[in-house]
Image (spheres, rainbow, N blue to C red):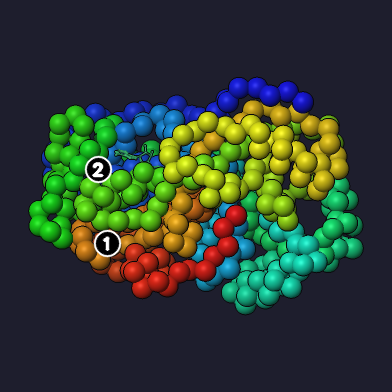
Amino acid sequence: MRKVSNLLPPRMTFEIGNTTGMGTNYDVVIVGGGVVGSSIAYFLSANPDFGGKIAVIERDPYYTASSSSLSTSAIRQQFGTAPNIAMSRFSIDFLRQVKTRLAIGDELADIGLHEPGYLVLATPERADAQRAKNRVQRGMGVDAELIEQVDLARRFPWLNTDDLALGSLGLGSEGWFDGPGLMQAFRRKARTQGVDYLAATVTGLTMASSSKVGEVVLDNGDRLAAGTVINAAGPWSAGIARMAGADLPVVPSKRCVFVFETPAKIENCPFIFDTSGLWLRPEGQLFLCGVPPVRENEPDDFGLDVDYELFDELIWPALAHRVPGFEQLRMLRAWAGLYEYNTFDHSGIIGRHPEVSNLVLATGFSGHGMMHAAATGSGVSDLIAYGEYRSIDLSAFRYERIAANQPIEEHVY
Ligand SMILES: Cc1cc2nc3c(=O)[nH]c(=O)nc-3n(C[C@H](O)[C@H](O)[C@H](O)COP(=O)(O)OP(=O)(O)OC[C@H]3O[C@@H](n4cnc5c(N)ncnc54)[C@H](O)[C@@H]3O)c2cc1C
C-alpha cells in the first residue's frame, strides 16, 4: 500500500461571477454560494410569484474549501425522524428530475445519480435497536428491508457476517451522485434566471434596527442594502450570524475521505455503514471510505489537513475485517472537508431568526446538506415568496427548537 499526497477531487470549470454588485439594493442577499445557497437562489429565481433581485456572495469562487466541493454526496432515506425523511423524499424526487429541471437550453444537467441503497449493519447487541428503527422507518414509508445474517451472507458473499445479526438495506431512493456537479448546475441555472453571483467576502452586517439587518458589507468596499439576508455559509455560518449579534450552534467538523483500489471482486456493493463506524461505497472501479471523528478530540478550526493515521490505525483494519477481499488494497489519495456541524441536535437549522426578523438561516446539516439541498432550497424559497412553507414543511427545523430544548433526535453518522 502506498500513500500519496492530498489530491482534491476533480472539479468542473465555470465562470467566477462579478466582483462588484450590479446595483447596491437587493431584495435577497444569500451569503454562501455552495449547494445550499445556490439551491435557494435557483428555486427563488424560478418562482414566478417572486420578482425580486437576488445576489449570492461567494468568497471562494473556485470552491476550494467549500463543503459542497469536498462532499462524498450520498443520499439516504434511512433516518430516524419524519422531518429528515421528508427532506430525503423531496430531494430524491428532485435529483431524478435534475437533467431537465436544471438544463440550460439543450444542455442537460447530468449528476450521475446511482441508487443501489444503503446497508446499515448491526451486531447482535444492536439488533433490537435496528429492528425498532426499521419499524419506525417503514411506518414512515421508507422502503428498507431487514436482512438476517444467513441471507446477508448469501446476498453479499464478499461480506464477513460472522459478528453480525442483520443489516437494513434501503431498496430504492438511496445512493450517491455528483454533488459538486449538482452545486454547479444550481448555480448556472440561477445565473441564467437573473441571479447575480458576486465574488467577494462578507465582512459585516449593519443593523437597520436592533432586530433587522440593513446592509451587507463586502471586503471590496461595497455595501448592499438587503431586504432579506440568507445565511448559507456552511461551516462558517456561526461567524455570519455573529455579525448580526446572533448565536448559532454550528461548528466546523473535519471529515477525511480516502480513495482506494482493490483487485477483489466486490459486486453489487451498496453504501455500507459498518458496526465499527466505518462507511464505504464504490466510486466507479474505486472505493471511498472514512470514519467519523471523536468529537471531543476535534479542534473547532477550519483546517483541512488529512489525518493519514486514521487510515492505517482504524480504517484499513476495519475494511479488512468487514470485507476480507480488502486485505489487498492500495490507498490512492485522500482529502478532508468540513461538516457544518450542529452541536445541538445534528440536523439542519432552517427558517427566520426569531430576533433578527430579516435573517434567514439554512445551515447546520451535519453531513446531510448535500442530500437535503433541494428540499432546503424549495422550502426557503417558499418562506421568502409567501411567508410560509408550501412545497415542503420545514418548520421542524426552526431555530426556536434550540431555546426550547426540543432536539430532533437523529443519529449522526
Ligand atoms: C467529506 C464530506 C462528506 C460529505 N458527505 C455527504 C454526503 O454523503 N451526503 C450529504 O448529504 N452531505 C454530505 N456532506 C455534507 C455536505 O457536503 C454539506 O452539508 C453541504 O455541502 C453544505 O453546503 P453549504 O452550501 O451549506 O456549504 P458550503 O458548500 O461550504 O458553502 C458555503 C459557502 O459559503 C462561503 N462563505 C463562507 N463565509 C463567507 C463570507 N464571509 N463571505 C462570502 N462567502 C462566504 C464559503 O466560501 C462556501 O463556499 C459531506 C461533507 C463532507 C465535508
Residue that numbered label 2 is attached to? 55
In this picture, residue 269 sits left or right of residue 335: right
Point out the residue furthest to the left here: 208
In the image, what residue occupies the spot 21% across and 64% down?
355
Q: Where residue 91 sits: x, y (%)?
A: 50, 57
The picture quadrant where one finds residue 48 is: bottom left
Amino acid beneath label 1: His
Residue 174 visible in the snapshot: yes
Q: Quadrant of the N terminus?
A: top right
How many dots with numbers? Answer: 2
Q: Where residue 201 sits: x, y (%)?
A: 27, 35
Q: Quadrant of the C terminus?
A: bottom right
| Vertical arrangement, residue 100 with respect to residue 336, above or below | below
The picture quadrant where one finds residue 183 is: top left
**Mark 2 crowdedness (10 Å alpha carbons): few <14, some 14-19, many ≥20:** many
| Vertical arrangement, residue 241 with respect to residue 107, above or below | below
Local secondary structure at mark 2: strand
| Vertical arrangement, residue 356 with respect to residue 13, above or below | below
Front: mark 2 or 1: 1
In this picture, residue 125 sits left or right of residue 139: right
Amino acid beneath label 2: Ala
In the image, what residue occupies the spot 86% across and 43% down?
324
- Foreground of the two, 126 or 105: 126
Residue that numbered label 1 is attached to? 353
Query: Would you say the residues marked 2 and 1 are in contact, meaning their CB atoms lie under 8 Å apart?
Result: no
**Mark 1 crowdedness (10 Å alpha carbons): few <14, some 14-19, many ≥20:** many
Q: Where residue 2 sits: x, y (%)?
A: 73, 23
